[in-house]
Image (spheres, helix red, strand yellow):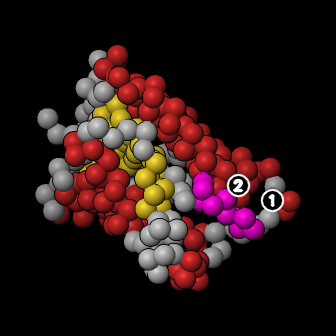
Amino acid sequence: MQQVLLVTGGSRGIGAATALLAAQQGWAVAVNYTADAQAAQAVVRQIEAAGGKAIALQADVADEGQVLAMFAAVDAQLGRLTGLVNNAGVVDVTARVEDMEMARWRRMFDINVLGTMLCAREAVRRMSTRRGGAGGAIVNLSSAAARLGAPGQYVDYAAAKGAVDSFTIGLAKEVGAEGIRVNAVRPGLIETDIHASGGLPDRVRDLAHLVPMGRGGSAPEVAQSIVWLLSPAASYTTMALLDVSGGR
């Protein structure tokens, strides 16, 4: 039976690279997107052109109703879920904490934390052997910012990713005996357009000198770690917080 994977925020960057690599390794992939249907469909077409199976599904992961509809669509169109990559996430413009508004914090935690928890809940309901599932794997996207704190830039983003780390640890322990492995990948400076969305399009180039390896990383490099954690090759790996950060 073909393994079924949902990648949130799968239309671009690390999410798209993960969807493409997973499809190459035999997964049927649901590519979630929030607004850019064209980008998500482009990922689906690329997977299909290579002989794989994929669908694009719109949903805002911070909206419970939309998430429930998305998981129901995966059930109906691809079958029972066996893998989840919680990749959807946002940053905001550079600011100090005393200059941040409550609305910014709510958005940051609604998407990065509550969206991750909500999708994980729905995945566990389908994967857990306690509920008749066949097991599976969840990979949450954290960030090296959870360790570094992102002072003067986006402490709120770092705090949200710290919450993702804690959630990963707790959930891994909770469902470990139910056939579900839960891990997190913590990328460092990676060349994606998330930096431009935060007002710092040159952030990777500007900070590359702080990375022991002397360069920023790429989305496909992060995807390799994510897809490994999803695979049987990582069968005894759970509760791991895997840094993919060039040593930073």
Evaluate whether residue 113 shows in this view.
Answer: no
For label 1, the SS is: helix
Quick one: label 1, few (<14), some, or many (20+) residues within 10 Å? Answer: few
Residue drawn at the location 54% of the way across and 44% of the way down = 165
| As drawn, 125 above or below 95 | above
Q: Is residue 62 above or below residue 156?
A: above
Percent coordinates x, y for residue 19 in the rendering: 31, 56
* Observer-nearest of 125 and 156: 156
Q: Position of residue 167 (x, y in %)?
A: 54, 37
Mark number for residue 155? Answer: none
Q: Residues within 10 Å of mark 2 (few under 14, many from 20)?
A: many
Bounds of the magenta segment: 145-153
96 w.r.t. 112: above or below:
below
Q: Quick check: is 24 in the magenta stretch?
A: no
Is residue 59 or residue 158 the one in the foreground?
A: 158
Q: Are marks 2 and 1 in contact (CB under 8 Å)?
A: yes
Look at the image and tell me in which quarter the N terminus lies: top left
Q: Amino acid at mark 2?
A: Asp
User: At 33% from the left edge and 67% from the top edge, which residue is drawn?
Assistant: 220
User: Which residue corresponds to mark 2?
Assistant: 156
Q: Which residue is painted at 59% across and 50% down in the image?
A: 161
Element type at mark 2: helix
As measured in the structure, the alpha-carbon distance from the residue carrying label 2 to the one carrying label 1 is: 8 Å
Q: Which residue is mark 1?
A: 97
Q: Is residue 2 above or below residue 203?
A: above
Residue that sits furthest to the right in the current view: 98
139 sits left or right of 94 in the view:
left
Please state if 119 lies on the left or on the right of 83 as rendered: right
In the rendered image, residue 152 lying in the magenta stretch gets the answer yes
In the rendering, at what x and y percent does residue 111 appear?
A: 59, 47
In the rendered picture of this protein, how many numbered marks are placed on residues? 2
